[in-house]
Image (spheres, grey):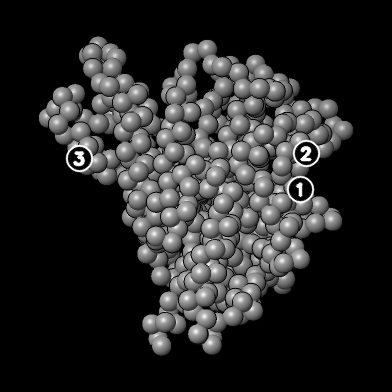
Amino acid sequence: MALFSCAPRALYTKILVLGSCLTLALLLYTVSLSSSPSFSFSSLRSSFSSSSSWPSWTSSQSKHAVSAASCTPLAYSSGKWMYSPRTNQTALVHPEDALSFAGFAGCASSREFYWHLASDNQGQWDRFPVVDSWKWDLSDTSCSIADDSSEYGFRDLEREKHKRQFVQDLVENGGWLVLGDSITEGHFFSISCLLYPHVVATPDYVKNPYFNRAWPQNLYLNPDSPLVSQLSFPEGFNTTETPLITFRRIDLLLSLEELVELHKQKHSKDDNFGSNFTLFSNEAVWTMSPSQYVSDILLSPLPKGNYANLIVSTAGHWTTTMFSGYANDTDKADVEHHGEGIDGLIDFFGEAMEFWANQVQDTIMNDQTGVVLASGGRARRQAMVRAYLPGHEDCHDHRKPWAEIEPMKWNWYNWGSIWKYNEIFETLLSKPDYPDIHYLSIDRPARLRPDAHATGDCLHIMAGAGVLEGWTEYIWHYATYFTRERRVYSDLMRRQKSRINRS
């Protein structure tokens, strides 16, 4: 890996020079293999040219790809909310009206349907249709926009053309494994609306309302979609067995057992953590080990799975009520605790996420199969960490977006410290040790939407307000323009190494 010593530590710098570093590395490696008659740049292009959902980036089009790659997470987050109503209707009359207000034809998922759309409480219907009438405007940013004149740039999934391209990409270039808490579950529900009717969802919560939060939720290609006849399928892909997107409820990214053991290793000599120390309370939590969801799910072979991207987010359950060993207050039994408090927990979060990142990077690096492409090639999988969100205090008193993020008054839960969790993750992943794990600081659009919460609390985000939908659009954009060269280059190196070993 000495070849990649030019990789910088700062994320924004890493993005800017990624293309030049990889190009230089590719040229150097190509020169060293010039004696091999089986290799040429033309064969490289034919091996890795993919479907139209992934731009081929030929020389005549490279300037458009470079322009699209200027839409970094920072550039995307510098946009603003713009009022853009989709209907002349002035009031919500039926709960399902929220679909048309949001620009949805429907939603494939049946999980808490109207709760996700925030139309389950008639007392808050006065928010509609305005709450669903905002678009994240990138016109004053460096982000180029894909339109009728150019396929390159940021794509709006309200457009049927782009919706179909996204489905095509998931089929032909690999799906998404989405992990996180109930905020991420809301993101999954939103994706099921964006891609409807081209996808179907499981499980069916109408037929079986006795759901278990640990159940996997999947989106599959709808066999009745007109897209089916237009797609190329990776060898082994099965429409009814191979998910395009899977959500799993993973609150902490590590299992409880792993966290307890890690804490013992890191803090066995600390005075505050004696033999009677207990890390966790009895608070409900859903989580598992990366050894399960990376090795057994992310890397699962066709037809069981063909995931190209692991997308995660965590911090909401990293509280001193969940990690009660860090609490420094009096509990319900009037017993006083003297833990290290939220700052100590945040330090442990950093240790835990480094442990997590090492496991994920090592597994991706050692994977010898990769994701199967419809073009016949294979590519290295990638992981993305989406910045976590705090909630908004008194959210249901708000009826429009903010222009700037406003400070909190009471710092409920761990909301006032979420930025510290995000900063730890961003700093960690800026290191060159994690070339296949990318941090996406795209939380600002949501931070500006105190009006866009579900009806029952001020943390969960409603589907249709543009926040969750923006996450999907940007993650797809990033996977297309920022990780594709890494995946293609890794696949090339694997193939060339195989040729050398056979010669």
Residue 144 falls left or right of residue 414: right
Residue 335: percent from the left, percent from the top? 22, 14
Q: Quadrant of the N terminus?
A: bottom left
Along the line of sight, which residue is nearer the eye, 376 or 456?
376
Task: Look at 51% across and 69% down and name the residue there.
Answer: 28
Q: Is residue 400 above or below residue 288?
A: above
Q: Position of residue 87 (x, y in %)?
A: 84, 36
Name the residue: 72% across, 67% down. Answer: 59
Label 2 vs 3, first from the N-terminus: 2
Q: Which residue does the numbered mark 1 point to in the structure image?
A: 145
Which numbered dot is residue 364?
A: none
Amino acid bearing label 2? Ser
Q: Is residue 280 left or right of residue 106?
A: left
- Which mark is on residue 139? 2
**Does the rendering let one see residue 113?**
no
Q: Would you say the residues marked 1 and 2 are in contact, meaning their CB atoms lie under 8 Å apart? A: yes
* Mark found first going from the N terminus, 1 or 2: 2
What residue is drawn where x is 35% and y is 35%? 349
Residue at position x 38%, y 31% from top? 318
User: Looking at numbered disc 3 in the image, what kind of residue is underneath it?
Assistant: Gln
Residue matched to label 3: 265
| Residue 118 at x, y percent in the picture | 64, 31
Hey, which residue is sitting farthest right in the picture?
Answer: 88
The spot of residue 225 in percent (x, y) is: 71, 63
Amino acid, disc 1: Ile
